[in-house]
Amino acid sequence: MTKREISERMCARFGEFVERQRLESKITLNALCREAGISKTVYIAFKKGGIPA
């Protein structure tokens, strides 16, 4: 397994964790992204385990 594959898996796991916390806290995706200062595109790519170029 390459470092990139490991990194993508870790991103996906963390993305899943953040999504669970977001749903439990009833925070909207827009509010989460606004607070984090990122776009929804970046968040979705991160959640899927990809690092957007």
Image: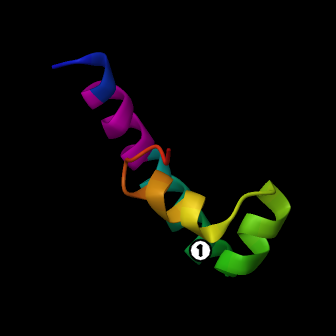
Rendered position, 8 above or below 18: above
* Residue ID at (59%, 74%): 24
In the rendered image, the quadrant that contains the N terminus is top left
Q: Is residue 12 left or right of residue 20?
A: left
Rendered position, 6 above or below 21: above
Residue 27 visible to an observer of this rendering: no
Residue 11's spot in the image, x, y percent? 43, 41
Number of numbered callouts drawn = 1
Residue extending furthest toward the left: 1
Q: Is residue 28 left or right of residue 34?
A: left
Residue 32's spot in the image, x, y percent? 73, 68
Residue 21's spot in the image, x, y percent? 59, 63
Q: Amino acid at mark 1?
A: Glu
Q: Is residue 29 magenta?
A: no
Q: Is residue 9 left or right of residue 18?
A: left
Residue labelled with disc 1: 24
* Pointer 1 local density, CA inside 10 Å: few below 14, some 14–19, many at least 20: few
Per the image, label 1 sits on a secondary structure element best described as helix
Point out the stretch of residues depicted in magenta.
5-13
Residue extending furthest toward the front: 53
